[in-house]
Amino acid sequence: MKMSSSVNLNPKTPRVQIKTPKDAFSQELFQFCLENPITVVEGLCSPSVCDFKLGKFSTLSLTKAWPDHPIEIRTQKFKSAEKNVPMAGRNSWDCYSARSQMTIRKYGEYQGANFLREKNGVGGNSAHGIQFGTNLDLSDAKMWQLQLQEFNKLPPAFKLYSPGNLLSYVGHNILGMNTVQLYMKVKGSRTPGHEENNKFCAVNINVGPGDCEWFGVADEYWPAMYKLCQSHGMNYLKGSWWPDPEECFAAGIPVYRFIQRPGDLVYINIGCVHWVQSLGVTNNIAWNVGPLVPLQFRAALERYDFNKVENYKSIVPMILLSWNIGRTLWIRDPEFFQLVKKVLSNSLDKSRKDLQQARRHNVPIRHHGKKEGEPVHYCGSCEEEVFNTLFIKKNEKRPRVFCLECALQSSPQLEDYACLQEYTLDELTTVYENFKRLE
């Protein structure tokens, strides 16, 4: 296994060449990915290593299987990767795209026409908008059985589901995170700058036939990226922005820049800010993973709290996840254990106080329970995760869930609300007391 990395304003991207299954499943590879902001893993999908069938994710295979299945389309202006030349009246970091929809068959025809133009050396993209097929969800096990079985071949560090993946303990699907999403591209298709939800790691495989160009910035520089976004009038968490590497260099921010070829797996480490542009017709598949290390859990919690300040929805329910970890895992690492234990303690305390408030205001409390696989609830006002004590308006035909704080804002005496309880305090207390560190 050949590895290399260096650090400066224009650092060389760490690359790993995998030649044997032993290399692929080694702890050394996993550690290398966790020690670098972003890593290109070459050869993992090859027949002699994991034999991951890229062809099952090709446009031809998808069209044969589900030609009329819809895919979201983003219409974008073709631009070079170096600069984000602004459209009239738009900011220079603004990476605008218009949403629409298309079928897989129709997009396949569009991709095919673009592929022929590329092959024959005929341009034209620069003069008009291009269409990027994005967020094709592959979570339906019946529809995508042939595709999903390929993921069982991957090493645990990159697997969609594994005992070492925090996202396997959420208990329900989070589309694009613990499910696979597929992206269908033509030359110039852009995924704007972002960090992964709640700073989780991510895996991205280029299916081909074209290449993709990537840019990455280590997690430690995200505050500087946040400030640059602000200076351009862009919202770091909610906006659609395309950074200028030269501006990043001027601000002292190192930028990784590299090519992802067909079969290359890119591992995006905790909090790495990245943006991607296709260099030709190609498809990509991507999903998130959460390594069972304290750094990942702490980063996810910190972003969870920061998202509240920024009024940004955390799609990873860290409270529910923590309770599921408490029920399921034995944790040896003392820092990791204390992080989870603190979440459980605070959550249990909040449940007690919420129920006390409900009783003080004579709010009816009904046991609601929580079914297996049922998604987490978010407040209909502030969009924060609501765990255990769900406040709903009495007279709504399709009741929305609210947190106590937002319920009190709209009804100081809570006279308009009832409270649904998912777990008894005894149930939660038992989980809390039984959650002990593995010595």
Image (tube, rainbow, N blue to C red):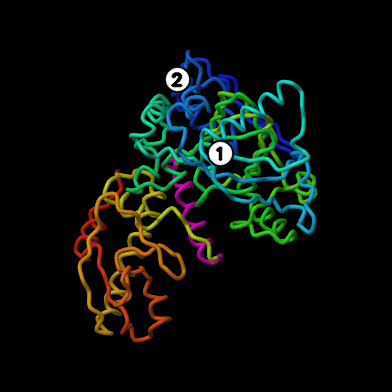
Instruction: Judge whether 102 appears above or below 48 on screen.
Output: below
- Tag 2's secondary structure? loop
Q: Where, quadrant-wise, is the N terminus in this rendering?
A: top right
Instruction: Judge whether 27 appears above or below 374 on screen.
Output: above
Task: Name the chief secondary structure element in magenta.
Answer: helix
**Residue type at tag 1:** Ile
Residue 39 counted in the magenta span: no
Q: Position of residue 234 (x, y in %)?
A: 68, 59
Horizontal arrangement in the rendering, residue 204 relative to residue 426 (left or right): right
- The residue that label 1 is drawn on is 268
Q: Residues within 10 Å of mark 1 (few under 14, many from 20)?
A: many
Q: Residue at x 60, y 39 (%)?
A: 37
Horizontal arrangement in the rendering, residue 301 relative to residue 389 (left or right): right
Horizontal arrangement in the rendering, residue 29 relative to residue 323 (left or right): right
Give the magenta part as a residue range.
Answer: 290-310
Q: Residue at x 76, y 57 (%)?
A: 90
Q: Residues within 10 Å of mark 2 (few under 14, many from 20)?
A: many
**Residue type at tag 2:** Cys
Instruction: Judge whether 349 appears above or below 276 on screen.
Output: below
Horizontal arrangement in the rendering, residue 254 relative to residue 173 (left or right): right
- Tag 1's secondary structure? strand
Residue placed most toward the observer, 377 or 142: 142
- The residue that label 2 is drawn on is 50
